[in-house]
Amino acid sequence: MAKKAHADGKVNVFKRIGKFFVDCKSELKKVVWPTIGSTFKDTWVVLSSIFVSAVFVGALDYLLTMGFGTIMHIAN
């Protein structure tokens, strides 16, 4: 797409900025916003996934700490 320039060779910046905001407004009209129910459902899925991951990482950390502690105790 070729840029239209004035007689002095400059591109009209204010027209381009205006077109940007008009395009943004038209794109926002196409957005399908989630319902409250689906937002809460998705939030619970994320929170439960975080909890499960935290328990897994915590258990793995505990087991590795105990294992390396035992190895270090035997080595001394």
Image (cartoon, grey):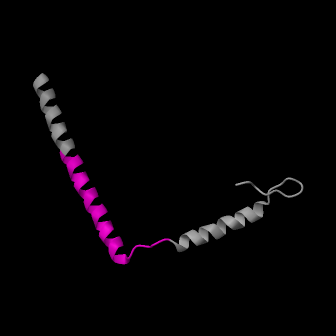
> On the picture, is 53 further left or further right than 27?
left
Vertical side of 9 occupied by 44: above or below: below
x then y, percent, for residue 27: 56, 69
As rendered, which of 57 and 40 lies closer to the eye?
40
Q: Residue furthest bottom?
A: 36
- Which residue corresponds to the image point at 76% horizontal and 64% vertical from the top-left? 14
Q: Main secondary structure of the magenta part?
A: helix
Q: 31 and 5: which one is in front?
A: 5
The answer to which of 4 and 60 lies nearer the viewer is: 4
Query: Which stretch did the figure color magenta?
Result: 31-59
Residue at the (63%, 67%) spot, across then down: 23
Q: Residue furthest left?
A: 74
Would you say residue 46 sits in the magenta stretch? yes
Tell me residue 30's x, y (percent): 51, 72
For the C terminus, the quadrant is top left
Relative side of 45 to 31, left or right: left
